[in-house]
Image (tube, rainbow, N blue to C red):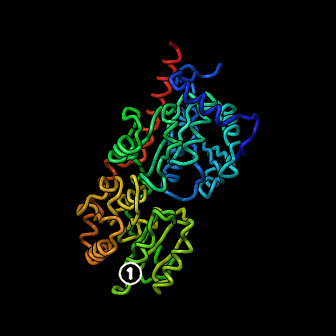
Amino acid sequence: MSIGEVTTVVDPAATFELAISSHESPSRPQQGERASSQQRPLRTLFVITSMPVGGAETLLVNMLDRFDPRRIAGEVVCLKSPGPLGEAISGRHTVHSDFLRGKWDLRVLPRLVALLRRRQIDAVITIGAGDKMFWGRLAAKSAGVPVICSALHSTGWPDGVGRMNRWLTPITDGFIAVADHHGTHLAKYEGFPEKRVHIIRNGIDCERFVPSVSARAKLCGELRLPSDSRLVGIVAALRPEKNHAMFVDVAASVCQADPKAHFVIVGDGPERTGIVQAIDLHGIADRVHLLGTRHDTPEIVAALDVFLLCSHNEASPVSILEALACGVPVVSTRVGSVAESVRDGETGYLVAAGDTPAMLQRTRQLLADARLRRRMGENGREIVLQTGSLDSMVNGYTRLIETLYEQKLALAAR
């Protein structure tokens, strides 16, 4: 992993004004750089805050592993620490980290600019809103990077775009949405130009996430549970918007009536202490299993009978695609674009955000009916195979990056 370097001092305010005022002048590739996207792969830098085990971070890892190296040469900048996934991929991908040392560390800009120039980056794609969306795009413009895009994976809090990020809309070539509903949200509520909103659906590796009979026995053995246990799970970073409190409340009620039910939480994050306290308060510490960060998610998800997602807000969460690909029905809050994958009554059930009684009722219904679970699971996998494959997502990013780059070359040649 490489560490951010400071090679020059840049006034962020002055650079911001220059970037905005010059947004209609396309960036020209530097002398010696390629004249066509077929001469060498496009050097593409993905900018993210850090890489804990989460949906957007997992998507990024999967894309980096699947890009055709003849077309896209991917690298990652973690503004802060690399995190578990950043560390895990550093042996096979270039990961840069430690550029932002504090909230008001304005020297993040010259550090990023120096890196972009040194690595001769052709395209920058920021992942998520917040600091990475702002500093990544501003640095890309300052460094003369031809293609600047922002990929967003959520709607509203805690990933609202915010005023300062909207200021940089003129220098952004594309905004990437993860579903139809999400694309509409970005244009209508975030105010991004509709012609610059591109929908590239989240995709997962359907050869890794598959139904598995042996997965259940393996997980039950690990947790020392009876083989006939009924397993309900969630895979999500332990953050407030994921609303694990609702998951624990459902678990408490189900466990009270069903001695065979066990609940599994995969993920880690700042809410872990509060979740543990809630579990202890309900007296179900022997029935709710916190597995933390895991790298065998396909096997864990495939072991479940029911998958729950309790989020206050989402765009198109990867975790439900993974569950459906494994043939596991989903009960989810009706948020973001979830309804495009969790089709109520067909691949699972949808409930209103925060409606714990409704989620409890649907969870009990599925746990009591193995045939219903099987039917919904089969429907879910078929839908993911049709609309949510990893290859389709990678192809979408590749085409978008190449198309925007060629357009910039054409404008620069005029």
Q: What percent of the width, then of the height, locates residue 144? A: 61, 27
9 is higher (above) or lower (below) than 272: above
For the point 47% across and 35% down, which residue is it? 398
Q: How many marks?
A: 1
For the point 70% across and 37% down, which residue is it? 110
- Residue 231 quadrant: bottom left
Question: Mark 1 = which residue?
Answer: 261
Residue 369 in the figure: left or right of residue 356: left
Count neighbours of disc 1 (C-alpha within 10 A) and say few if under 14, some if 14 to 19, many if 20 or more. some
Q: What percent of the width, then of the height, locates residue 209? A: 42, 58
For the point 61% across and 58% down, which residue is it? 84
* Front residue (pair 202, 221): 202
Is residue 205 shown to the viewer in this render?
Answer: no
Three-letter amino acid code of the residue under disc 1: Ala
Q: What percent of the width, then of the height, locates residue 236? A: 47, 63
Is residue 194 shown to the viewer in this render?
Answer: yes
* Front residue (pair 18, 412): 18
